[in-house]
Image (spheres, rainbow, N blue to C red):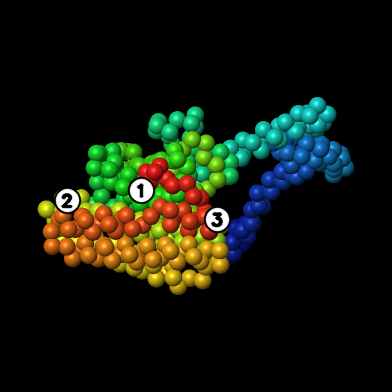
């Protein structure tokens, strides 16, 4: 029987499938005017106040013409910028802007001059807050060395694990000895140092030491220091430097007397004498080899001869058979270097002729 005769659908035929309609697109949000946002931001942060006022006005015109969101932002930006603009004009008229700028500049300069004691470096001149050099401080104020200052950094030394810890008696002695050497190398002309100058240093605190801080900072301090104490090409001419270096080398070696008594370690004393003799001989040769200015030649020649004579007596001391003979030659060697000859050499080179207090 034909299924169609009974009102049914024929075999093999299906009800057509209808593709459902897609979901309707959500409405697109109305964009916010970019100038309105910028005007509000500029108004809030108070930078270039008139700019926020102008941008807000332009934003309102665009919103009236094109529509969009951001009217409230634009109005807020205009209001805030107007207030900022009026404040700026008032400050300009009353001089407040200059005072505000000066205050900002001074604050910035103060912050730039502030340095941690562990950040100080060779050649820095600084003042301690309150001028109290005895109390522990974290930061100091660096200043130009041609201004009055409390101290001048001569150098730094990185403490080793084998060095005594700072704060202990041995640590204090060790730090002072290291700084004496560093100070002497920085200001090699002992005759040019102010009479009241002293060695000064910063050592790591207990907390800093535990945290790995190993920096020893050495400095000079004195009353009303002004000008750098450094001896170098910026402060002295080549002739002055050559002479100062010669005297400094002789002073350094001759001052390294052994700590033990002669009877306990005669070999150390004889070694000291040989080193001093060698230093005097080398520096006498250096003084003779240099072509000095005509007005200084005689005085430097006389000092070279004293170096040679002193060196011969130090050499005899190194060969001495007993302690009495050793000290006899050392005393003669020291007496050979007269203060008069040193003053004459310094005067000829334009250097200070006032002996340090320890030399009378």
Q: Position of residue 195 (x, y in %)?
A: 45, 40
Q: Quadrant of residue 102?
A: top right
The one nearer the camera, 262 or 344, is: 344
Q: Is residue 83 visible?
A: no
Residue at mark 2: 260
Distance between mark 1 and mark 2 Cα atoms: 20 Å
Q: Which residue is mark 3?
A: 350
Q: Is residue 211 left or right of residue 86?
A: left
- Image marks 3 and 2: residues in contact by CB distance under 8 Å: no
Label 1, on which residue? 180
Where's the C terminus, which quadrant? top left
Q: Tell me the crowding category of disc 2: few under 14, some 14 to 19, or many 20 or more residues within 10 angstroms, Cα based.
A: few
Q: Secondary structure at mark 1?
A: helix
Distance of mark 3 from mark 1, alpha carbons? 26 Å
- Say which label, 1 or 2, has the lower sequence index: 1
Question: Which residue is at a point 40% across and 57% down the rendered structure image?
Answer: 248
Compared to residue 87, the image places residue 28 above or below, namely below
Q: Nearer the viewer, mark 1 or mark 2?
A: 2
């Amino acid at each position: 029987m034909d299924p169609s005769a009974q009102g049914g659908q024929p075999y093999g035929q299906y009800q057509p499938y209808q593709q459902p309609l897609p979901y309707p697109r959500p409405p697109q949000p109305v964009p916010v005017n970019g100038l309105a946002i910028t005007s509000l931001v500029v108004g809030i942060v108070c930078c270039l106040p008139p700019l926020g006022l102008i941008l807000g006005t332009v934003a309102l015109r665009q919103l009236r013409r094109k529509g969009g969101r951001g009217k409230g932002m634009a109005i807020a930006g205009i209001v805030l910028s107007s207030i900022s603009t009026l404040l700026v004009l008032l400050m300009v008229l009353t001089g407040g802007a200059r005072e505000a700028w000066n205050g900002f500049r001074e604050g910035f300069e103060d912050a730039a001059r502030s340095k941690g004691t562990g950040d100080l470096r060779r050649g820095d001149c600084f003042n301690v807050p309150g001028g109290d050099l005895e109390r522990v401080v974290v930061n100091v104020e660096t200043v130009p060395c041609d201004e009055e200052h409390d101290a001048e950094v001569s150098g730094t030394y990185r403490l080793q694990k084998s060095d005594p810890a700072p704060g202990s008696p041995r640590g204090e002695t060790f730090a002072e000895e290291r700084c004496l050497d560093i100070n002497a190398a920085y200001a090699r002309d002992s005759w040019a140092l102010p009479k009241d100058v002293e060695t000064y240093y910063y050592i790591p605190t207990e907390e800093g030491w535990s945290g790995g801080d190993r920096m020893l900072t050495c400095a000079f301090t004195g009353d009303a220091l002004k000008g750098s104490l450094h001896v170098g090409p910026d402060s002295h001419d080549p002739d002055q430097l050559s002479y100062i270096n010669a005297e400094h080398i002789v002073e350094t070696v001759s001052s390294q007397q052994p700590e033990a008594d002669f009877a306990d370690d005669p070999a150390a004393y004889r070694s000291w004498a040989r080193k001093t003799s060698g230093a005097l001989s080398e520096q006498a040769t250096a003084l003779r080899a240099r072509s000095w200015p005509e007005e200084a030649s005689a005085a430097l020649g006389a000092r070279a001869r004293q170096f040679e004579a002193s060196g011969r007596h130090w050499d005899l001391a190194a060969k001495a058979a007993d302690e009495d003979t050793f000290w006899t030659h050392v005393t003669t060697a020291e007496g050979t270097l007269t203060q008069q000859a040193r003053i004459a050499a310094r005067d000829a080179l334009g250097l200070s002729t006032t002996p340090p207090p320890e030399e009378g």
